[in-house]
Structure formats: structure tokens, C-alpha cells
Image (tube, grey):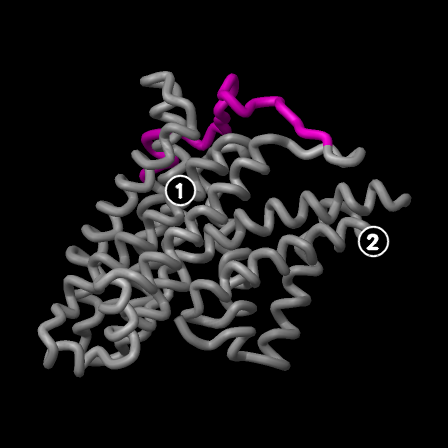
Amino acid sequence: MNAQAIAQVLTSGLLIGLMYALIAAGLSLIFGLMDVVNFAHGEFLMMGMYITFGLFVGMDLDPVLAVPIVGSALFMAGVLVYLLLVRYAMRAKANVGMVQIFSTFGLGTLMQGLAQYFLTPDYRQVSGGWLANQTVELGGVFLPLPQIAGAAVSLLAFGGLYLLMSRTDFGRALEATREDQGAVALVGIDRNRVFALGWGLGLALVGVAGAMLANFYYIHPQVGGAFSGIAYVVVALGGFGSVFGALVGGVVVGLVEATTTLVLPASMKTVGVYVLYLLVVVLRPSGLFGKL
């Protein structure tokens, strides 16, 4: 394998790694805020992809233009999930952690079942969009335009998230609530409101990822499973609760996955990712970064 082929593989790994980072960002945000792992995260990614597909088929709206609509829809879904399910799970008198786990796991199972029943298990795809079948050549390396656009949107999302977290009252309220949930009530911060908006923001991020992913990936009821597994590895690598650790973790996972294909068949590309996960768990359980 020559240098050009290696550059092709690694650049592709970088692009998909940025998508992994965006998918994982909401998962890490919710955990850092509330110590709750959302086991329905992959199903919300699936939901975002189906909404994008529906807008494309029903309104001829390109996935790129659908991004703000899908993000807004998932934001509202996140607020509702917190208000109608998660906040009650957090009030459990015993085995709080297990109640939270099974609440979100059950929600994910329900969402997947409903998608199979109403939308059928058939594979669907967005075909004929603005970015479809277009590539860009850089020094002999051919890169699909949908992946480039997805990576660019991921970087923009992280840039917007940084500004939100560092320059707004809401961002400071998120940080304060994460640090001490009890003390924030003394300064007039409504913890439940922050939690609801945090869930909304976390699911909005995965909705944006789903809209961009629909440009180049098949859509079906189980699509979220593989990506949620990768997202957990990204969160573990970056550090549970570290949103911007997810950015670094996503890139590393994407590059490891791509490098694995240089030595193993493409069908075994996730082997390197899960080996990395085991190494992180054993050698540095806190991940690269340990805070929001």
C-alpha cells in the first residue's frame, strides 16, 4: 500500500471521526450534567435520520437545509423525554441507577419497535440531494462531499457549543448545576429547567448528526445501534462528562478504525476501536478529560 492510499484511508477516518464526535457530544453532555447514561441515544439518532428522510421525500427539502428543523425537533423531544420520563426515574427511592438505565433502555426499545412497525424494517436512503455522488480531490486523495460537509457541520456545532458554554448565562448555569446540583437552588437556578434544556441540547446535537448522516448512510430502525456503541467508546476515551473530550475522542476513534482497515478486512474495522476501549478502561478509566 502506497502513501497516497494510506492518506486516503486516514483522511476518511478523520472525517468519520468528526461525525462520531458529534454523535457522542450529546451523550457526554447529558452524563456530565446529570450522571445519567441515555441508552436510547442511538434511537434518537435514528429518529433524526427518519425525520430528515421524511422532509426530503415529503417536502423535497435537502438534508443540509433540514439540519435546523431536525435539530429543533430533537431539542423538543429531549425536553419532553426529561419532563415525562427521566425526572421521575431520578426520583426513585431505591436502585436509582438501575431505574435510570432501564428507563432509557426501555424507551430505546420502544422507539425501535415503533419504527419497525410503522416504517417497516426496509432500508431507505436520501438519493438525489445536493451533495449526492460528489467528491473533492486534494492531492490525489478523493473525498466524498457528504462526509466533508458532515465534518464541517460537526466543527461548527462544537464551535457553537463552546460559545454557548463559555459566553452565555445558560452555559454557566449548566456548569454550575453539574458542579453542585444542590447549591444552584440557593442562587435561584431552577435545576429541573436546566436539566430539561440540557436534555434538549444533547438530543439536538444528535439530531444534527442524524441529518448529516442521512446524506450518505442507509436509514433503518436498527441504524442507531452501531453508532451508539461507537459513541460510548468515544465518551469513555474523551472522559465521561467531557463534551470537548468527545471531539478528541471521536477523531481518535475514527483514525483507529481507519488504521485497522490497513491490517484487517474492512468487515473487522471495529476490532481496533473496541481494543482501544478496553485499553482505556484498564489504563485510564477517567478518559483523556474528566470534566465538562
Point out the residue furthest to the front here: 167
Q: Secondary structure at mark 2?
A: helix
Q: Main secondary structure of the magenta part?
A: loop
Above or below: residue 158 compared with residue 266: below
Q: Which residues are magenta?
A: 114-137
Q: Residue at x 36, y 40 (%)?
A: 47
* x and y, in percent, of residue 162 in the image: 39, 59
Q: Nearer the viewer, residue 265 or 63?
A: 63
235 in relation to 127, above or below? below
Q: Position of residue 86 (x, y in %)?
A: 22, 62
- In this rendering, the answer to whether 138 lies above or below 17 is above
> Does the magenta-highlighted stretch encompass residue 248?
no
The residue lying toward the viewer, choosing from 123 and 77, is 77
Quadrant of the rendering where the N terminus is positioned: top right
Q: Which residue is mark 1?
A: 208
Taking the spot 33% from the left edge, 68% from the top edge, the residue there is 36
Determine which of the numbered discs, if any, sits on residue 263 in the image: 2
Which amino acid, by three-letter code, is at mark 1? Val
* Residue at the spot 26% in from the left edge and 60% down from the top edge: 168
Q: Residue at x 67, y 48 (%)?
A: 13
